[in-house]
Amino acid sequence: MFNLNINSNKYIFLYASAMVVVVALVLSLLATFLQPFQERNMRLEKMQNILATINIEVERGESESIFHDYIIDTKVLDYKGEEVEGDAFEVDLQDEIRKDLTERLLPLFIAKVDDEKYYILPLRGAGLWGPIWGYISLKSDFNTIGGANFDHASETPGLGSQIAEKDFENQFKGKKIFDEEGNYISINLIKGGAPRDNPHKVDAITGGTATCNGLEDMLYEGIKVYKPYFDKQ
C-alpha cells in the first residue's frame, strides 16, 4: 500500500496543486453560471441610467418594463450624422472611442416625456484613476440639457466620486451647449463656483480637479461628435 508522508514537501506540493485546480474549476463554473445574471443586471442598470437623464427615477428591477414607455426610437449614427445599421443598445462606447472618428458608431436614444422629445447621448472619458462615463439628454432644440447621469470606476471617494451624486448632476439641467451666436462650447466646470446665471457653466467639485477636467473633456468631445446629426434636423 502506498503511503505518503503528509509532512513531506512532496505532499504539501501535491495538496496545494490540487487545491489550486479545484478552486480554479469552481470559480470558472461560477463565472459561467453567473454571467447571464451579470449581463442582465448591466442591461437593467443601463436602462435605469438612460431614464435618469429624462428625470424618470426607477428601481433597477423596474427599468426594463418602463424603458419602452419613454424611449420611442434608437439610432446608430456615423461621423457624418447619417443613420447606419446597428443596435444602439448593443454599441460598446468603450470600444468605439478607441477607433478613428470616421469608423466610429454613435448610439442615440430618443425619448418622449409629456410631449417633449429628448435626445440621449452616451458619453465615455477618463477621470483621475480610471474611466468615467454617463449619459446626457438634450431637448428638441439640440441645445438645452434635460438631465445628466454620470458614473466612474475608481474616482476618489468623497472627491471625484461626487460626479455620480444627484446634487452634482442636477446642475446640468437647463444648461446650454451652444452660445447665442450658435457656436458649440459645451459645458465648463468652474473651480470655486460658477455664476448662477451663466447657461454654460456649473460648479466643479472641490478637491476633484482632475476628475472634473476629465468630465469636461468627456462632455466636450462626446457631444461634439453628434453635431453633424443635430445640423441635419
Image: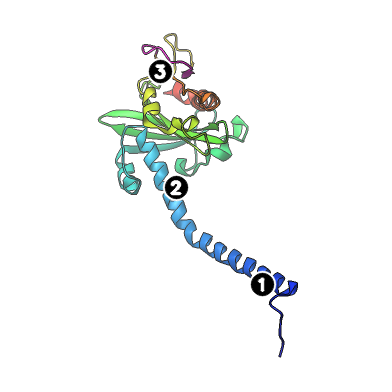
Residue 98 placed where, x, y %?
A: 61, 36
Residue 35 position (above or below residue 131): below
Q: Callout 2, which amino acid?
A: Met
Q: Which mark is residue 199?
A: none
- Answer with mark 3 or mark 1, whichever residue precedes in sequence: 1
Which corner quadrant of the image does residue 22 belong to? bottom right
Residue picked out by circle 2: 42
Residue 50 placed where, x, y %?
A: 39, 37
Main SS of the magenta part reads loop
Q: Is residue 15 magenta?
A: no
Residue picked out by circle 3: 176
Q: Which residues are magenta?
A: 187-198
Q: Callout 3, which amino acid?
A: Lys
Q: Kindly indicate whether the residue at mark 3 contacts the one at mark 2 (C-beta within 8 angstroms).
A: no
Report how many numbered discs are placed on residues in the image.
3
Please, what secondary structure does the residue beneath circle 3 have?
loop
Residue 146 position (above or below residue 43): above
Asked whether 115 or 54 is in front, the reply is 54
Give the residue drawn at x 63%, y 32%. Answer: 100
Please, what secondary structure does the residue beneath circle 2 have?
helix
Q: Callout 1, which amino acid?
A: Tyr
Determine the CA span between mark 2 and mark 3.
30 Å
Determine the CA span between mark 3 and mark 1.
65 Å
Please, what secondary structure does the residue beneath circle 1 have?
helix
Say which of marks 3 and 1 sits in front.
1
Tell me if residue 121 can be seen.
no
Residue picked out by circle 1: 15
Say which of marks 1 and 2 sits in front.
1
